[in-house]
Image (cartoon, rainbow, N blue to C red):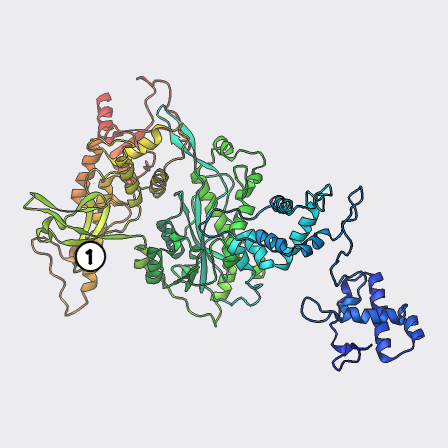
Amino acid sequence: MVGITDQHDFNLAHWPDLEVSGLSQKKLDTYLSRKNGIRLYIEGADHEAIRAASGVGVRWIERLIRRCMKIHSDGRIYGWRALVRYYRIEPYVRKKKVQPDPFGRGCAGSLQSLLLREPDFERRFRKYIFQPASPGKLKQINKPLNVIWQWFLAELRKLGYEVRNEWPFSTRSMGYSAVARYLEQLMRANPAKAAHLIGGKSLADKLKAGDGVDRPKFRPYQRVEMDAHKLNGIFCILVPHPLGGHTPKIVRRLWVIVIVEIYSRAVLGYYLSMNPEVDKQDVLRAIKSALTFWESRELSMGNVRYADDAALPSGHDERYMGLCWDEMSVDGALAETCKTVTDALRNVVGSTLVDPSRGFASRRLKDDRPFIESFFRTLGVRSLNRMTNSTGSKPSDKKGRDPAQVAIASEFQLEYLEDLLDVLIANYNATAHAGLGYRSPLQALDFATTRDEAPPIRRADPHLVSGLLSVTKLCVVKGGHREGRRPFVNFFGASYSGEILIGRHDLVGTKIAVTNHLEDDARFVKAATASGHSLGLLRAAAPWNGLPHSLAIRKAVQALIHDHRFRVAAGEDPISAFINFAESAPGRKLPPHPAYLAMRRIKTALARRGEDANPLIHTALARDRLDEERESRAEANDGGPGVPPPAPAAGRRQRPLATRPPRQRACPCTAWPQASRRAMSGLLDKHLDSPLPRHVDSNHPILQQQYAVHTPDRGHGPHAGRLDRPQKDGRQHLRTVPLRQKQGHALASA
């Protein structure tokens, strides 16, 4: 063939080959016969041999060779790929004028012919399809096919096609199918523009990513992923009603912040946030959960149980408690990338933050944090999305159900959710994972950390971890002889003073460092001078010395008082007033305030530990802990022979350490100072006839000594013959009388 086979670079061995495994038997036979005919033609065989081998003549073979020499879209010639039967290598080009029959047929290639005649219209048509949304301007994005078709017809009307009754106005469908096919071809030919048009920049960036084969390999605790997930469920709380009983009230959907170690897929820690949006304190609580000891909860619902070996790593083995990671990958949310979180990671954990500002990761792109997104999907598929109070991941998942009505009818309480979430996460760590060779995350972590070649892992300082949520502020010492008031400081809207500070009149007018070291109890803080000398514990003055609360709860209560949402009487505890305000109108449609939910959590934690929320009890315990700290420091300073013990402070009497009796920690009453016991006795005598709060354990040793707990008298009085209304947990209202009074009644009756 002149101009083809006589070229110096013509060689059948260089032709791109075809993968024949996907061809049908009929197409395969045709392909092999054509390929054999071309080989015989190049070798110079006679016409009869070529026809006998391929079934076609020489002229047909020459046509096939020209077809194979066409340029493919990949830049190479078609080669053997052009021999497939019915395979089109050139687009259809209409040559005749469009004249549809009465049934609308005979219009093949009409759109292509129109675009060839109107190049300016084709340019504007493509620009309208791929027009991006300008930043800061209000425009329509992701245009549907119907909108594009309407624009197409409107522009052709301006060009006079409708007046001349030309295609597409001469057909019944008005070219709708042709426009749809043309749009699909454009999207396939321009995948980057199409992805940006459909899913924005995040979807377009996914086309740049690899398939994960060359993903770097990590060692244990080298990188963790953290993200917040909004739970797909509606839950309620039982609010006490003023007339007795309880009223269920729906709470807003809650967030859970989870930290996942990517090597073993193990969940290191989590935190269930009560806020409408995640803040930095929630993130810090999740980090602290990953660095502290995990303990299984006392479950209070249904048949939910912990599986065998179910735990978080810190509860699975003590060697995992406090282990630090090197990198933390987040999605760029402000609560995760703020300066407070970044400083805490650097100073306490020794970790760097991998956020969108430092790498390819971008917000709400699941491929950048595949492990934690996979965990959230598993959490929903295995549990929450399978319950009738689930909202699902989209509105259609409800399937006609009303999750709020189900939550109220079943009284699925928030406390049950906390138990369920803890069980689900612990069981996940003990469940076999296909990506780990069917080991559980805990087994994979044990295998990786117990090998001889396993590198050592850093461990966080327990003192720094305990102070992860502490808040420190420089406060000016006020008071003094000029005001006739003992020295005090104002710390987040409350006045604080202590045993040491009230005697330091020399600090008036100077700044001291005040630290809230108990994240759930802002009634007590630590103080130190600018030079670092400790000033001991400071206690909040009235009215903030009542119920335990956090600084976040105090700020919320102060904001509500400032907005005149409720009033606080003189001398009344604002926290108690806030609780009464939140529970006084349980029929409101608005969800409970997040501060009220946080307060319930604090009271529940106190009840589970069997502690009292009374300020004098905590004062005595705080003083006791302070004395123990002083003893431990004194013993540490007593370095042995030749080193005299530290001298006692001036003006204070102190017994030698050797003569101090050992402290009995089994019963707090025996360890309290005499003054604290007198204060406790006076407090109990003051509230002889008050009912015992629900969150106070009636078996507390202090209450057993000072109180005799019994049910109401059924023999006389206005409530004769019945007991008080039982609570949801099965307990009854208890009435208390002092033990001395009960013994007096017994003697009088005798």
Is 728 situated left or right of 632 in this image? Answer: right
Question: Residue 191, image x and y in percent?
Answer: 60, 58
The picture quadrant where one finds residue 190 is: bottom right
Instruction: Looking at the picture, tell me which residue is in the foreground, 281 or 208.
Output: 208
- Estimate how packed mark 1 is, as few (under 14), some (14 to 19) or many (20 or more) residues with alpha carbons within 10 Å: some
Dot 1: what SS? helix
**Point 73% across, 41% down: residue:** 172
Instruction: Looking at the picture, tell me which residue is in the foreground, 686 or 37.
Output: 37
Residue topped by disc 1: 631
Residue type beneath disc 1? Glu
The quarter in which the N terminus is drawn is bottom right
Question: Residue 584, image x and y in percent?
Answer: 34, 28
The quarter in which the C terminus is drawn is top left
- Up the image or down, 511 lies above or below 715; here it is below
Residue 432 seen in this snapshot: no
The picture quadrant where one finds residue 644 is: bottom left
- Up the image or down, 524 lies above or below 730; here it is below
**Point 18% across, 39% down: residue:** 679
Q: Residue furthest left?
A: 482
Residue 45 seen in this snapshot: yes
Q: Residue furthest bottom?
A: 8
Instruction: Looking at the picture, tell me which residue is in the foreground, 113 or 146.
Output: 113
Question: Residue 23, image x and y in percent?
Answer: 79, 62
Question: Residue 712, image x and y in percent?
Answer: 33, 24
Is 335 situated left or right of 149 in this image? Answer: left
The picture quadrant where one finds residue 90 is: bottom right
- Up the image or down, 411 lies above or below 379; here it is above
Is 297 situated left or right of 149 in this image? Answer: left
- Total number of numbered discs in the rendering: 1
